[in-house]
Amino acid sequence: MIKDPVTEYYNLVDSGHVSLYETNPALADDLRDYFNRCKSQDIQPNIDFTDEGFGLYANGAWTIIESVAKECGIKMDALTIHISDMFASYPCNTMPLVNDKWLQVYKPDTDPPTTDFKKFGHFVGRASPDRVAMHVKLSKYKDDMWFSLWHGYDFDNKFFARLEGLDEETITKCKKIVEQLPQVNTFEEPSKNDFYDWPNQVKPLHRYYKNMFVDIVSETDLDTCFTTEKTLRPIIFKTPFLLMAGKGTLQKLKDIGFKTFDNWWSEDYDNYTHLQRMEKILDIVEWISVQYNVKKYKEEMTLILEHNYNHYVNQEWIPMAKQLGIPDIAFGDTRTWE
């Protein structure tokens, strides 16, 4: 009689060794103990990263995972990683999960309070290096932009080292900005619960989305196609968007049935990431800034905006995502908020 292997999970988030940008080398010792225990007790090794979805290549975590697994005699086809990124792929058994905001459907009020119309929106919670740089680059348009940049990481030498590649003037402005947080022209800072609680975290933004042309989305991770509530916001609020995210993220959205805006501007920026992607997006922003009647463009985009909203609300993207190989386990119970 063949015994089914017992499953035990190593929680990568709870370990405290992994962050968006770096990994503590102490992860190796933890994993060595875990993998050796798995082998001695005939346990199926599983790495749980369902509380996050940022990339494990750029922060060095995957190098440690792969190296220690090899050292302990764990083959890649025996190792499973569960990660909250529906597009994730690693050279082991990858179980990509859907970010829960995509399943907890939010239907906003149809008539939010009115406010002044502006061409741009850029809404940021945590002030990571790339987001601070984008905020600085967009500052020339601040009179025609709704924006927020609330709080940040530790603004130390490691933080500023990640600005490498930018011109000195921009780096100097970034250093100044982080000393003056928050930078906001929308609403008062929400409570900690509302800041992270769905859908309360997006409700105050509705009035601004209704009264702007395009959202410049700054996603969590620029090294993966990890799509969070930040990408969902313009879809929910029927707003065009430019997506500062990992290479190929726009194409992934198209693969699961969403439509984008290449009839109005070039989306070849999706072939790039980091600074190159930022510069190409800024070229589009500059073009939009000199357009006289962007409301007319938004009206032309109505069919696309309605399609994306309905595609999300009706969960029509789910069967298309399953066709891409995302396992059924990734799609739990859906919930609708109104």
Image (tube, helix red, strand yellow):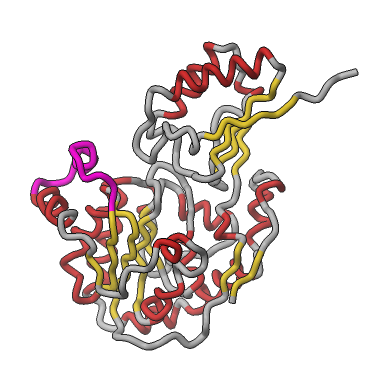
Find out whether residue 294 is within the magenta segment: no
Q: Position of residue 123 (x, y in %)?
A: 33, 65
Q: In the displayed structure, does residue 221 sit left or right of residue 39?
A: left
Q: In the displayed structure, does residue 324 sit left or right of residue 199?
A: right
For the point 62% across and 30% down, which residue is it? 46
For the point 31% across and 46% down, which residue is it? 274
Query: In the rendered image of this protein, does residue 76 appear above or below residue 109?
Result: above
Q: In terms of image quadrants, where is residue 215? A: bottom left
Give 155 or 213, whichever is nearer the viewer: 155
For the N terminus, the image quarter is top right
Q: Position of residue 259 (x, y in %)?
A: 52, 65
Tell me how many marks there are. 0
Q: In terms of image quadrants, where is residue 179? A: bottom left
Q: In terms of image quadrants, where is residue 300? A: bottom left
Query: In the rendered image of this protein, does residue 79 appear above or below residue 220?
Result: above
Find out whether residue 162 is within the magenta segment: yes
Residue bounds of the magenta highlight:
152-168
For the point 48% across and 88% down, which residue is it? 111
For the C terminus, the image quarter is bottom right
For the point 49% across and 24% down, which residue is it? 65
Give 121 or 203, whichever is nearer the viewer: 203
